[in-house]
Amino acid sequence: MLFGFPLLSLVIWLPIFIGILVFATGGDHNARLAKWLALMGSVLSLLVAIPLYTQFDPIMSGMQFVEYHAWIERFNIHYHLGVDGVAVPLILLNCFTTPLVIIASWQVISNRVSQYMGAFLVMSGIVNGVFSSLDAILFFVFWETSLIPMFLIIGIWGGPNRVYAAIKFFLYTLMGSLLMLVAFIYLYNVSGGSFSILDYHKLPLPFVPQILIFVAFLMAFAVKLPMWPVHTWLPDAHVEAPTGGSVVLAAILLKLGGYGFLRFSLPIVPDASQYLAGMMIGLSLIAVVYIGLVALVQTDMKKLIAYSSVSHMGFVTLGFFLFNAYGIEGAMVQIISHGFISGAMFLCVGVMYDRLHSRQISDYGGVANKMPIFAAFFMLFALANAGLPGTSGFVGEFMVIMAAIKVNFWYAFFAATTLVFGAAYTLWMYKRVVFGVVASPGVEGLTDVTGREILILTILATAVLWLGVYPLPLMEMMHTTVDGLLAHIAHSKL
Amino acid sequence: MNFLPPNLAPAYPEIFLLIMVCVLLLVDLMVGEKMRYVTYLLAQIALFGCALITFTTSVPEVVYTFSGMFVDDALADVLKLMVYITVSMFLVYSHKYLAMRGLFSGEFFSLVLFATLGMMVMISASNFLILYLGLELLSLSLYAMVALRRDSVVATEAAMKFFILGALSSGFLLYGMSLVYGVTGALDITRVTEVIQSGVVDSTVLVVGLVFIIAGISFKLSVAPFHMWVPDVYQGAPTAVVLFIGSAPKLAAFGFVMRLLVEGMGGMVADWQGMLIILTILSMAVGNLAAIAQTNIKRMLAYSTISHMGFMLLGIISADGNGYSSSMFYIVVYVIMTLGTFGMLMLLSHEEFEAERLDDFKGLNRRNPWYAFITLLLMFSLAGIPPTVGFYAKLSVLQAVLGAGYIWLAVVAVLFSLIGAFYYLRIVKLMYFDEPESDAPISPHGDVELLISVNGLAVIVFGIFPQTLMTLCVYAIQRPI
């Protein structure tokens, strides 16, 4: 352990400060400088986050790397940071994704480059803040602030319908989180004036307030995750966002919702969580099955992947609300794995979009003839998205299905349909886009991936395969935390 | 009979300001058109002097003078200091704007200072009549300021509306006060409190009086359903005058509410709580819903003011020290944001051109990224999105209202603030997502540019470190607890 060294603060504030420096490079005549500065900053942020993995003690329960300072004494709000086995993988995923996004946008973005690159760095720091806050208001500040860069990224660099998508994204998420804020203030008053999340974990609560708090949290996290039926902002946001925005949205921002369930809903209101588990499982299964079918009929590749994200996120909530270790760990593996796979899928679509400026499946066909290397990468990610054993997509889904079968056969049955539907929509899209004869003069003119693109895709492919073959380090990391959480939920707070 | 001269010390700032206004009027006669900035500097010096006097004569205990008609306490000191700062910032923001429009005249500054004097009297009054005196001094100066551009039709119309409705509301207030006087037989606020708490008075008449008083206050605070004048005055008056109306008088109005409702009618909490709940919900509804439909930014900000005043009342509804200091924090934050927003509007205006359509913000990020960023901060702050200070303002009033047990009211409030977020976002959208309509460069004025940067950054600096400002508000409210 690095005693006393504010590692988490560094992980949060370093990208934000470098992001501000990138903003300061000004107009597009300094674009080169902005890009290199952003790349250096993001790599540096990844490097400083590595001690979170190497110094993390997976045996120890409770929070690690804790920082605790008075912040707003008037309301007893503290600058309280700390991470456990659930938060560290998410922070690492976030730090890992940012450099990839910056490299992916290297040539595509030529307009207001410094603002684009800076926004991603700032967002990376803010998201690290969300994952490491142990004070409800600090958490809320980071949580809401993360909307601002994404709003601007979609709205400035997005597609034709970007304004609608950006405002819908913002208002939807804001609606959910405002009720969460009311719940926090209620907890503050009930707990006798504390905003500490760890105090809330211990706070006894009667049944009816528990239900209301659960619903308020659900509004925030369900919108963010997103769960059916509040998922409708996601396809719009994904379709309109630039490639980098889609990657961060899918790989990182959706995970905030899943993290919220683990950090807030389950431990703060365990009785309500168990009481309403049936509803949550129902909603999750609807997402898995129904949204899987919706994905099948999409004609826009990005929309298809967006719906596939919603469907995969159904596994996350399913795993959480089964209340066994397999379920929660499986859901966490699914979260990390989906971060790699969906990021990679959006990057693949981005690679094609940069060349042909179309996302319509019907505009493609026979891409493999012109882009063989790309087709191979795309194949790997498509199979991972469909949950092929040996890729990371399989591990999480398999664990959740195992957990479900222990609880109820039919849960497992409906969850397992994703192996059929997932394969159907992903591979069918892949077939229509990549195989066959060259469909149009546009496809005829395609050139294969460049070295820069190969670099990103290789990194992601390695991650997908590594997590698929050897997920043990990830599971070891969160084992103690998940056991502690389950033991905590088992005690009634009534 | 011996005549005992009253203790003048608590009123030194007021006396100093009155002398300075007279000096300013005389000096203004001597200096010509070219030397008008002397008047401007003199006004700034007057405000600075007041601040110095208030600061040095500030004592922790409550001091009454003029036979208990005038009071000096922590609330008065803090609010007055805020008023000086606000008025001084207003003068910096507006002097170039006024000069371009031929409004940079001696009368303007004397009116501003008289209005300031009125606010100070309102804040320090401890007697119904003195309260009324301060209010009228403020109001009459404001009517004249709105009508200052007398060749403009909209300005004249706005001034007429403002004057007639303002006079009506003063009438309401006076009628309410006279009913309370009739029942309690007292005009001094301390005495009224004692009589009400003794419980020997006819509460029916008292409640009728309270209704009129609340109606009068609501006019001045621009709370729905007494808000009709606000959009028209905001649209018609010169932007500089709107900035003045929208900023410092709100601080004074808060002081007014504290003196009249909390200190004077504190024994009738249960009665005015109910009335205020209706007013606050109406204001949040009218303000946020009507703002969406506006295309004129000044009208939009007028409705935004109405909704913010509704939010501010949430703290007063909770009727404890915590709630009052939350409301005060809300008002102070609101004034900071208003100064910045209207300052930006004046910055975007130039000689021939008045920035008042929403579309004038189009593509600001292309024309000047720094101004766009400052406006972005101000808009997110108005919408109450962290990490800006607007969030903590909402947080503290919500905390107060939840603490008082009104969970449903807090939920209603956050839902309306969600609606409100839409029209602030629309400005961000115009600045960042749209292409500019004109490429006219924005002429920088050194001092204004510096101040607007400080103002914009204050929104985020206070957002990250709100503790100082909150402590100040808690300190100011210590007495009524």
Image (tube, rainbow, N blue to C red):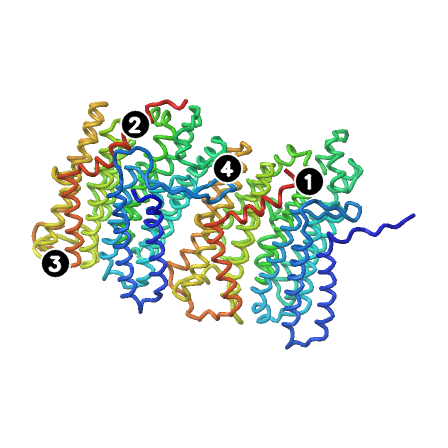
Horizontal placement of B374 versus A403: left or right? right
Mark 1 surroundings within 10 Å by alpha-carbon count, few (fewer than 14), some (14 through 19), many (20 or more): some
The nearer-to-camera label among 3 and 1 is 1
Disc 1 residue type (three-letter) = Glu
- Do tag 1 and tag 2 residues touch (Cβ < 8 Å)? no
N-term mark: 1 or 4: 1
Determine whether A494 is above or below A227 in the image. above
From the viewer's perspective, is residue B161 above or below residue B74? below
Could one spot residue B203 in this view of the protein?
yes
User: What residue would you read off at disc 4?
Assistant: B410
Q: Secondary structure at mark 4?
A: helix
Which quarter of the image is occupied by the C terminus of chain B?
top right
Question: Residue at horizontal 62%, vertical 35%?
Answer: B273
Q: Residues within 10 Å of mark 2 (few under 14, many from 20)?
A: some
Q: Amino acid at mark 4?
A: Ala
Residues under labels 1 and 2: Cα distance? 53 Å
- Three-letter code, disc 2: Leu
Mark 3 to mark 4: distance in Å? 57 Å
- Per the image, the residue denoted by label 3 is A448
Front label number (1 vs 4): 1
Residue at 28% in and 37% down = A85
User: Disc 1 marks which residue?
Assistant: B263
**Residue type, label 3:** Asp
Which quadrant of the structure image shows residue A206? top left
Q: Which one is in front, B6 or B333?
A: B6
Q: Secondary structure at mark 3?
A: loop
Percent coordinates x, y for residue B354 in the rendering = 52, 66
Q: Which residue is mark 2?
A: A486
Residue A332 is situated, as x and y percent measured from the top left of the image, at: 25, 36
Nearest to N terminus: mark 3 or mark 2: 3
Q: Measure the alpha-carbon separation of dots 2 and 4.
A: 33 Å
Measured in 3D between alpha carbons, the distance from the residue under mark 1 to the one under mark 4, in whole angstroms, is 25 Å
